[in-house]
Structures are given as C-alpha cells and as structure tokens.
Image (cartoon, rainbow, N blue to C red):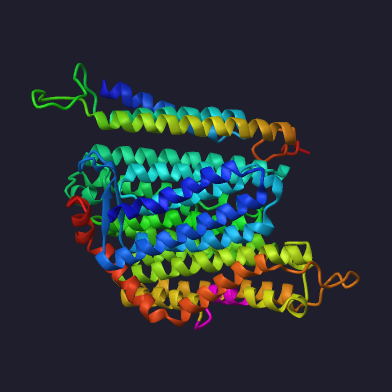
Amino acid sequence: MEWLVSACFGVMIACGVYLVLRARTFPVILGLTLMGYAVNLFLFLTGRLHTNLPDIISPDQTRYADPLPQALVLTAIVIGFAMIAFLVVLSLRALGELDTDHVDGQQEKPPA
Amino acid sequence: MTNLLILPILLPMVFAVLTILFRTHHRHANTMAIIGAVLHLFVSCLLMAAVLDRKVISLWVGSWPSPAGISLVADYLGAIMVLVTAVLHTAVVVYARIDITVRQIQSGFYPFMLLLTAAICGAFLTGDLFNLYVWFEVMLMTSFGIMVMENPAGRLTNAVKYVTLNLVSTMVLLTGIGLLYGLTGTLNLADLHDKAARVENTALLTSTALMLMTAFGIKAALFPLFFWLPASYHTLPASVAAFFGGMLTKVGVYALIRLFTLVFVTQTHITHTALMIAGILTMVSGVVTAASQMDIRRILSFHIISQVGYMVLGLSVLTPLALAAALIFMVHNIIAKANLFLVGGLMHRVTGSFHLTQMGSLYKTHGLLSLAFFIPAFSLAGFPPLSGFWGKLLIIYACLESRHYLSAALAALVGLLTLFSMVKIWSEAFWKPSPRSDTTPAGEKLSFWSLAPVLCLCLFTVLLGLFIEPVLQLALVAGEQLLNPAAYILAVKGGG
C-alpha cells in the first residue's frame, strides 16, 4: 500500500515537473495542477495510512486517524484551487492581448 | 492586553473593506487608506512598546488549547518588523496619492495594498508554520492583484512567470511542511524547537530543512532562485515597486531567520553552511549583474538581491552579533531601498524616463530630489554615518569574529561594487548635462505629497545611522532572544 501511494506521488510530481518546463502556458498550468494534486496527497499522507479508524479523538478510542493533516489538506486544496483559477484567467488575458500562449509573451524565432 | 497582537493584522483588513466601499471616490479612498495606515502605525508602536515591556507576548487565537490552536507571538524581531512594515506602508500610501491613477484605484489598489500589509504583519507575528504558509498565500494573492491591475501588455507575461514560480515554491513549501509534520507531529514553531531536536532521522530532518530553505529562498530571491524578481519588479508603478521591493523579499528572509534559529539548529554544519554559500553567491551575483544595467529600476532590483545576500550571510554566522547585524541591515535596507524606488519614480516624473542615458542635470534643477536620492543611495552603498554603513560594518565584524574571513572580504567587496552602481546613477542622472537641452529642463514641479514621504524616509535613514547605539542594543537583545528561544517557548507554551 505504501509503495503504491508513494509511486503515485512520484509519478505525478515527475509529470508535473516535465509539464511545467514546457514553453506554453497550457501545459504549464496542467503541470502545476498535477503537482498540486501530488503535494496535497503527500500532505494527507503525513497522518500515515490507516484503514477503518475514526478521526475523532476520544478517551475510549485507543487508535485513531490523525485529523490534523485532513484539516491542513483542505486548506491547501482551497488555496491551490484559487491560485490555479487565477493563473488560468491571467493566461487567457495574456493570450488575448499578446496573441501568443508562449510564456515569454513572444514566439521564439523560427530557425534560420 | 495580549489581544493587541491581533490588531496589526485586523486593522488593515477592516480598512481594506472600507476602501472597497470608497473605490469610486478616489480622493476619499486615499484619505481612508492614509487613516488606516496611520492607525496601523500607531498600533504597531503600541505593540513595540508592549514587547519592550514584556520581552515576548503571545496569544492563542480563540483560546484554543495548545496543540490544536494557532498562536500569535511577538518577540523583538517580530515587533520590529511589524513596526518597519507600518512605517513603509504609511509612506507608500501617502506617495500613492500622486502616483496611482484613478483607474488603478478603481481596480482595487488600496484594498489590495491594505490586505497585503495585513498578510505581511500576519507572517511576522504568527507562531505556526502552516499559518505562515497561509499568510504567504494571502501575500501572493494580493501581490498578484496589484501586479495585474490596469495592465500594460508587457506586465502580463511577467505576472504569469511570477505566479508560476511562486506556485512552484508554494508546493515545495507545503511538501516541506508535510515532512516536518510527519517527523514531529506538530507545526507550532515553539513546539518544533524541542521536537525537531529529538528527531532521530537527522538525514530526513536536514532534507526537510533544505526543502524549506529552497521554498523561502525563492520568496527571498536567493541565488540561484532570484530570476523572477528583476523580471517582474521593473514594470510596476513606483509606489508598488517600493513596497514590493522593500517588503516581500524580506518576509522570506524573516521566515528563514525564524526557522533557522528556532527549528533547524541541530545540523548547522550542513544547513547554515548551505545558507552561507547561498548568501555569498546571492550577494556577488546580484551586485555584478546590477553593474551592467542602465534602467534605474533594474539596477535597484538587482541590488535587492545582493542585499538579501548580506542578511542571509548574517543569519548563517549564527552569533548574537551577526543576527543583530542582519536585523539592523534588514531594517535599514527596507527603508532605504523602498525610498530609492520612490525617488526613482519621482525622477521618472521629472525627466519622463527610467533610463539613465535619458536623464541629466537633475542636481541643478531639483535640489531637494537630489538630497532625497543622495541619502538612501549612499546609505545603501555604506557611507558613514548613514545606516547602511553600520549594517555592513557589523556583518563584516561578525564574520571576522567567527573567522569567516572570505565572507567578510567578499561582503566588503560587494559594498564597493554597490557604491559603483550608486555613483553611476548619481553621475548620470544628477551631474551629467541633460541630453535633451532643447526642451525646458525643469519638467513637472514636485508636489508636497510626493516629496514628504520620501524626505521622511530619508530622515529615518539618517536617524537610524546617528542613533546606532540604542538601536544596536535593541538588536542585540533580539539576537540573543533568537539564539536562546527559552523565553519565546515559555511565552507560547505557558499560554501567554
């Protein structure tokens, strides 16, 4: 189980980094989204992997899932969502005004 | 009494809402923002006084008990930073009266500015790592908002880069926070001090430290992560560039200082050596790149980078004197650097250009402006008795004292190169005969609103230099407090 989840995390980060290094805004945004998912998953995992455990701390419960990472990841998801939404709108404006989706705002010159 | 801690965060937020209501009446919006800034300055002074009285004050917000709640803490470092933020914010808001257009006000300049101030103060006062992340996000969001308001097309691509890079740094930061929580089970900074020292897997702890160093290094524009800064700052209006250039990188530096004195202090031979190397390279690369630029704003942007290097160098030496020196240098730099951006804006107003080749003979036509440039510029270059001289002297002295001779020599050399850049601006813009002799030399007359904040900041720089003795005492107490965090931890855990 741990292996599977950490492999998922690794693959998502790798894809994300690859996409972020592209020169067009759309792949960059997709890459950031992927990386965001991966990081949120990671944050969630810091409470360790459990099955069938309640996340409420009470005296008669000896084992429980750590509720704090779940709260943290909710915050991170919301903030990350807002950031990506802003970036999408910004890129669309840049595309509309500059007529290119290159991250430098201008097409690279065709090889001579 | 400890509720005072919440005011520097809450007050700008309240005024941000008020200025939203006044956004179509730009004069009223400005007056409202100035009132907010002055009140904020007042509560920051109160907070400073309270900290001077009681050393460290802390507050568990909403009285939630220790591990689950979020604490706000003000020690000397935090209170001083809040005070400097308030001073700069007030000056910038007054300056904005002439600098910011009606359209920019309508697209929300003042609310964003006030929220940004609230977020910066929140970052300085929080005692919780995750909360620090949240304040950084609020800062980013508001700075994005300011960056794209009424945008000329060139600014959009810069904004895209700025946003992308900051998102990447946020992800590194979150991963670091996750690792740290996984290792210690807490995110409260005071709690982390004990628990991080007890972590057995030191390799993982060190990689966490380096991860957080990378994340905050991007925000603080450390080598080799600084390329976003000159690319985005030089297109902003002068008052915004001043506030961003003065404050935003310093919040990153503050976070580094906080984490690497309070949490990651067990593996200093790795973490602080890395900080020192990064600091030195930042210093050198910033100043060398600045030397080749001709646009005032670009020169100043690269100098932000080089001076962040000094602060990080001071942190990496990790003695009370070095930390005090870093703190003095940070205060001096925030004020002087922001002031130079404001003066650069006035020079643009007078000559119609930011490019040095287009300027000239300002000394003859605008005496007061020359004075306003001279003081911060030569303070930055390190002329005695201005504040920058003491900052650099103390950092070099602290390096020598702990036998980092190469760092000391490079710090002195970088000071010399800074002087070169400042002299270049001075001789090109002020002494050289104006290249456009056909037009009337004196352009626009500078109004009271534009000169008053600039001259007040100049006065601050001069006073900081002249009264260095009490300032140094204060900074030394702050340095001691950072290296012996017992009082900090007691104040937080004892419930304040």
Is A67 included in the stretch rendered in magenta? Answer: no
Q: How many marks?
A: 0
> Which portion, as a residue range, is magenta?
B374-385
Instruction: Give whichever of B296, B67 is nearer the camera.
Output: B67
Residue B32 visible at all: yes
Is residue B490 placed above or below A55 in the rendered structure? Answer: below
Is B382 included in the stretch rendered in magenta? Answer: yes
Left or right placement of residue B118 versus residue B1 in this view: right
Residue B231 visible at all: no
Is residue B455 placed above or below B31 in the rendered structure? Answer: below
Q: Where, quadrant-wise, is the N terminus of chain B in this rendering? A: bottom left
Left or right placement of residue B282 versus residue B296 in this view: left
Q: Position of residue B221 (x, y in %)?
A: 50, 54
Q: Position of residue A42 (x, y in %)?
A: 34, 30
Q: Position of residue A83 (x, y in %)?
A: 51, 34
Instruction: Give whichever of B276, B474 is nearer the camera.
Output: B474
The image quadrant that residue B361 belongs to is: bottom right
Is residue B142 placed above or below B258 in the rendered structure? Answer: above
Q: Position of residue B34 (x, y in %)?
A: 56, 57
Left or right placement of residue A20 versus residue B175 in this view: right
Q: Where, quadrant-wise, is the C terminus of chain B in this rendering? A: bottom left
The image quadrant that residue A100 belongs to is: top right
Residue at (44% x, 74% y) in the render: B391
Residue at (24% x, 51% y) in the render: B190
The single residue placed furthest to the top in the displayed view is A52
Residue at (91% x, 71% y) in the render: B438
Instruction: Give the dominant element type of the magenta stretch: helix, strand or loop.
Output: helix
